[in-house]
Amino acid sequence: MVRMFLSAVTIMVLVMGCGRGPESRGQREIAWADQHLLFLADGRNGQVRVFDLRNGPVPRASLSASGRRSVADMELDPARAQHWVLGDDALYRYDARRFVLLDRRALPTNTGPERALELDGDGVPVLLAAGLRIRLLA
């Protein structure tokens, strides 16, 4: 566990060192301790990189989607092995074990630029935007 933590810290230091000033904003990370994975999103280009932390930080996958230019937020549902990525105009659902895009859902148009994502108790994504809580899937 200590090794995984140190690996995650090493990755974060390396990635934060790559940014310059305001450009480094938009970095988000999620650690999946049971699977020894770290999901690292770069809000500037829409990429999510996945690292295996078992034997040091080893790149496992790069998650991208056609048309996604940024990452506003992301969530992990370990029980369902789903990784949700909130892009600039859509919500993307990935298989968190195989790193495969499962589907893309367009976002409501009136949500504004400041958005966040959370999962409710049933694993359903909820968009937090413009003072509203919008459940994105029924």
Image (spheres, rainbow, N blue to C red):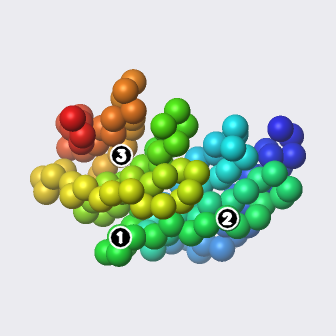
Tell me which label, 3 or 2, sits earlier in the chain. 2
Tell me which label, 3 or 1, sits earlier in the chain. 1
Q: Mark 3 points at which residue?
A: 116
Tell me which label, 2 or 1, sits earlier in the chain. 2
Image quadrant for the C terminus?
A: top left
Query: Front-most of 48 and 24?
Result: 48
66 relative to 5, above or below: below
Q: In this view, does 55 lie to the left or right of 9?
A: right
Q: Quadrant of the rendered structure where residue 58 is?
A: bottom right
Residue drawn at the location 61% of the way across and 66% of the way down: 61
Classify mark 2: helix, strand or loop: strand
Q: Mark 1 points at which residue?
A: 68
Q: Nearer the viewer, mark 3 or mark 2?
A: 2
Classify mark 3: helix, strand or loop: strand
Q: Name the residue under label 2.
A: 60
Q: Distance between the residues labelled 3 and 1?
A: 16 Å
Query: Front-most of 60 and 89?
Result: 60
Amino acid type assigned to the residue bearing label 3 in the image:
Ala
- Residue 29 visible in the picture: no
Which residue appears farthest toward the top when viewing the image? 121
Q: For mark 2, does the 10 Å Cα neighbourhood hold few (<14), some (14 to 19), or many (20 or more) residues? A: some
Residue 26, percent across and down? 48, 61
Residue drawn at the location 54% of the way across and 59% of the way down: 99
